[in-house]
Image (spheres, rainbow, N blue to C red):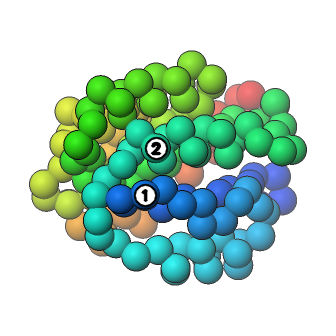
Amino acid sequence: MQRLDLSSDAASILSFADDTRLEQARTHDLALLEQAIDRIETGGGTDIAEALTMATEEFFAGTYDPTSLPALLLLTDGRVPNVDETLAASEAAKARGVRIITIGLGTEIDETLLREIASDAATDYWYAPTAEELSEIYRKISQQLDCEKDDA
């Protein structure tokens, strides 16, 4: 989260398992974002379809800036009970201009599905066998997004 330029960037935090919850609505406040992350508990199912749908709605709710580059970071094992519904939700988000970046976390991930969900299977899919790799992946994603923001 520290890599965000919250003077211009905003972020929301959603958690998803058996249900999807908006933990923190879009904000520029780092402390609120970090508190929301700290509240998330792991476990349960993986309803990516609902998470993608809710996240997309959150992007375009309220004070949406049409000049922004909406990017959704999805951290999951990708093992879902509803593949078709998940792919439909990802296509709907992409059709609205949302860039979806997926990170497969763990040793038992559905890499094929996560590559399909990602906006670009070559550049927007990442794999982290353990949480220790996440910091470096986040750094690389941040650099990618910063370059694209500069080009916009």
* Amino acid found under the numbered disc labelled 1: Asp
Q: Mark 1 or mark 2: which comes first in sequence? A: 1
Residue 6 picture location, percent across and down: 77, 61
Q: Are marks 1 and 2 in contact (CB under 8 Å)?
A: yes
At numbered mark 1, what does the secondary structure look like: helix, strand or loop? loop
> Which residue was labeled with disc 2?
50
Q: Position of residue 110 (x, y in %)?
A: 19, 42
Q: Nearer the viewer, residue 93 or 121?
A: 93
For label 1, the crowd category at 10 Å Cα-Cα, with few meaning under 14, some 14 to 19 and many 20 or more, is few
Q: Which residue is mark 1?
A: 19
Q: Is residue 79 above or below residue 14?
A: above
Q: How many marks?
A: 2
Mark 2 surroundings: few (<14), some (14-19) or many (≥20) residues within 10 A: some
- Real-space Cα separation, disc 1 to disc 2, in angstroms: 8 Å
In percent of the image, x 65 and y 39: which residue is there?
57
As helix, strand or loop, the secondary structure at mark 2 comes to helix
Residue 65: give x, y in percent of width and height. Answer: 83, 37
Q: Visible in this render: residue 147? A: no
Residue 44 quadrant: bottom left
Going by the image, does 135 lie left or right of 21?
A: left
